[in-house]
Image (spheres, rainbow, N blue to C red):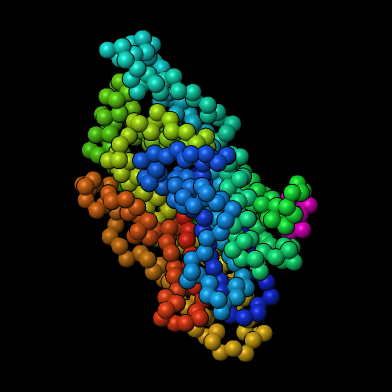
Amino acid sequence: MIRAPRCFLRISVAPAAALAAALLSSLARCSFLEPRDPVDSSLSPYFGTKTRYEDVNPGLLSGPEAPWRDPELLEGTCTPVQLVALIRHGTRYPTAKQIRKLRQLHGLLQARGSRDGGGSSTGSRDLGAALADWPLWYADWMDGQLVEKGRQDMRQLALRLASLFPALFSRENYGRLRLITSSKHRCVDSGAAFLQGLWQHYHPGLPPPDVADMECGPPRVNDKLMRFFDHCEKFLTEVEKNATALYHVEAFKTGPEMQNILKKVAATLQVPVNDLNADLIQVAFFTCSFDLAIKGVKSPWCDVFDIDDAKVLEYLNDLKQYWKRGYGYTINSRSSCTLFQDIFQHLDKAVEQKQRLTNAVSSAGEENQYMLSKEQVSANFFSSHPPVWSCGDPSSTAFSHGLLQRQGTPYSLQLQGTNASEVPKRSHCTLCLEPDICALPL
């Protein structure tokens, strides 16, 4: 889920043929510990980074360890020589802040139940009463930690990548693997689980040793690289610690769209509307996702909202990411230069090694394409879109699903090389970043 920066995974082999550098990103949330009939919700497409991985890629339900290859990603004449990946952490618990808000909302429902005897005026079991009795099993100690399903996510991802790039993930290259992570516990734990998955690939049936004893070494913590926004003074001053930076987010919370949802939820749960606010509504919405992702159950929280509500709540979350992590402020994208520079420096080295060891002139096309992607990042290429404000008609395109993903914020963008059909044998370079994700360097 969201709010945890990165692990970063990097692996390479001695260059042999044409260069193919792939920058990969994982998807989103996850769900089940054992194979079973999938439990889903019509709200799932609107959970953003709290969406289960299986909801984005249903193939994970039937084959969580089976790789899927885009036919155009690597051509038969192209040999991968280095892989760099930014990989999101596995499924996690809600943060302590989210849990406290959920506890506050749960308390309102229980107080309502004590006033009316736990039922509606007709004596039937209404939704508010069902939620008051629904177990609140989240505890403060969980505080965004990785759940066991999240460890399974990472182990299975390691097995899929090892199967997809067998030459890179050969036993001989295991010692050349490097993992970098932020200090966030869910990211450190995700990196360790990834290494355990690779151990399972190399030594089927044998229990993995402690990651500190593995040949490639444990994940290395580097917050300046993986949590670059925490180390950018201009970002901290102008955005993170600026009380007015999220003005449009706060304005939208008190705007007509959110106020309509507050009134609707208050009526549904039979609680005073003045006891609710946008933050409580949002945590209730995401609790549906957490229950789906962690326990594989559809809780009554999923029945509080409909699709129209989900679109507005998705927009609220997108609006925050736009102004805090996206193109709302120039420094948001520029603060990521440290990470981009590190990625491209390693690709530069791979290009240099290839040029030293081969006389093939076809590498010019590959290098030009790579340099184009580099310039696109430096020039903030994907910033030419209208600003996103707090006001608007929910039926307009401004509220359409995935607005910021389509427009391309600096942490949710793709840089792709020229189509392979246009320039044969060029490497295909895809980069996808999201805010506050755990990146595993491959």
Q: Would you place residue 16 above or below residue 223 in this image?
A: below
Say which quadrant the C terminus sits in: bottom right
Q: Residue at x 47, y 55 (%)?
A: 434
- Is 227 left, or right, of 331 in this rendering? right
Any part of residue 127 in sight:
yes
- Please name whichever residue, 267 or 123, is drawn nearer the observer in this view of the structure: 123
Q: Image quarter for residue 163?
A: bottom right
Any part of residue 6 in sight:
no
The stretch drawn in magenta includes residue 122? no
Q: Residue 12: horizontal and vertical position, in percent?
A: 65, 69
- Please name whichever residue, 173 or 255, is drawn nearer the observer in this view of the structure: 173
Q: Residue 164: horizontal and vertical position, in percent?
A: 59, 63
Q: Residue at x 63, y 50 (%)?
A: 155
The span shown in magenta is: 210-217
Q: Residue 270: horizontal and vertical position, in percent?
A: 30, 20
Q: Residue at x 28, y 34 (%)?
A: 261
Q: Would you place residue 379 above or below residue 202 in this image?
A: below
Q: Would you place residue 271 above or below residue 428 in this image?
A: above
- Is 198 left, or right, of 186 in this rendering? right
The stretch drawn in magenta includes residue 215? yes
